[in-house]
Amino acid sequence: MAENLKIVGSPSCLEALGPALRESGFDVKPFSRPEEALSQSPDGVVFSSQDPGWESALKTLREVVELPVLTLVKKNLGRAEIEKFRGQASLGYIREDAPIDEVVVRLKAMMEKGVDPAAARESRAAKRIWFQQPVKFKVFDREHIAWSTTLSETGIFLRTQLSFPLYTVIRLQFDIPGAETFECDGVIVRQEVEGAIRGMGVMFQNLKGDGIASLESLLQWHRS
C-alpha cells in the first residue's frame, strides 16, 4: 500500500526515520519550509514537536491543503500539550520513542483516511480511537509487552506476533495521559493472523471506578 506514496518530513524526523520509511516503501523527501513541502505534492507529512517553528509551519500547511500530518512528541506528554497539537490541526501524534514499525502502521492508517485495518472486517457499537502505547500484559504467569493500536470503552487491540487461545484471561497495564496507570483484566476475543495489522483484540473485564472514569475521560476528550 505504501508503494509510491510520498512522505515529506522535517530534517530531524527523517534523520531518524528516513531509511526505515524508505524500506517500508514510502518515497521520502525532506523539507525546510511549508512552501517546499507543498511543491512536492506529498501524501503525508511527518513533524517533530522539537522542530523550531513547527507550529506555524503546520498551521500554514493545513490552511492550504488537507494532508495527513503525524507529529512525533515526547514520551510523557500531558493532555494540555496534546490539545495544542489538535488545535494546530495535527491529525495524529505518536511518541518519539515509538518503534519505526509503529510509525509506519500509523502513517498507512492515516493515509487510508482513518480506516482501522485490524478491525475493518468487524462492525462494532463501540467507537474506537487510535491509541499507540506500550502495554504490559501477563498471560499464564509470564509478562509480555506489545504496542496497542486502538482503544474503545470495551477493549483494546494489541499488535503482537504472539498467539494465545481465545477467551484466555490476561492482566493489562498501560498509561493514560493525565491519569494514573490503568490496570484491569481482559479476555482475548479475537486473533488477527493475516492482513496489515496482526495481533489480538482484548475485551476489558473487572473495571474499577477510577479506571472507568479515566477511560471515559480519555475517549470523550479524543472525540470532542
Image (cartoon, rainbow, N blue to C red):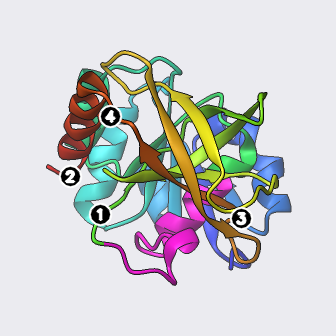
Is residue 41 visible in the rendered image? The answer is: no
Q: Position of residue 123 (x, y in %)?
A: 38, 80
Q: Is residue 118 left or right of residue 176?
A: right
Q: Which mark is residue 213?
A: none
Mark closer to the chain start, 4 or 1:
4
Mark 4 to mark 3: distance in Å?
34 Å
What type is the residue that disc 3 sits on? Answer: Arg
Q: Which mark is residue 55?
A: 4
Q: Secondary structure at mark 1?
A: loop
Mark closer to the chain start, 3 or 1:
1
Q: Secondary structure at mark 2?
A: helix
Q: Which residue is mark 2?
A: 223
What type is the residue that disc 4 sits on? Answer: Glu
Q: Foreground mark, 4 or 3?
A: 3
Q: Are marks 1 and 2 in contact (CB under 8 Å)?
A: yes
Q: Secondary structure at mark 4?
A: helix
Mark closer to the chain start, 4 or 3:
4
Q: Which residue is mark 3?
A: 198
Q: Which residues are magenta?
A: 104-124
Q: Nearer the viewer, residue 164 or 39?
A: 164
Q: Which mark is residue 127?
A: 1
Residue 204 lies, with reference to residue 110, above or below; the image says above
Q: Position of residue 202 (x, y in %)?
A: 54, 53
Mark closer to the chain start, 4 or 2:
4
Q: Secondary structure at mark 3?
A: loop
Q: Check residue 37 for magenta coloring.
A: no
Mark 3 to mark 2: distance in Å?
25 Å
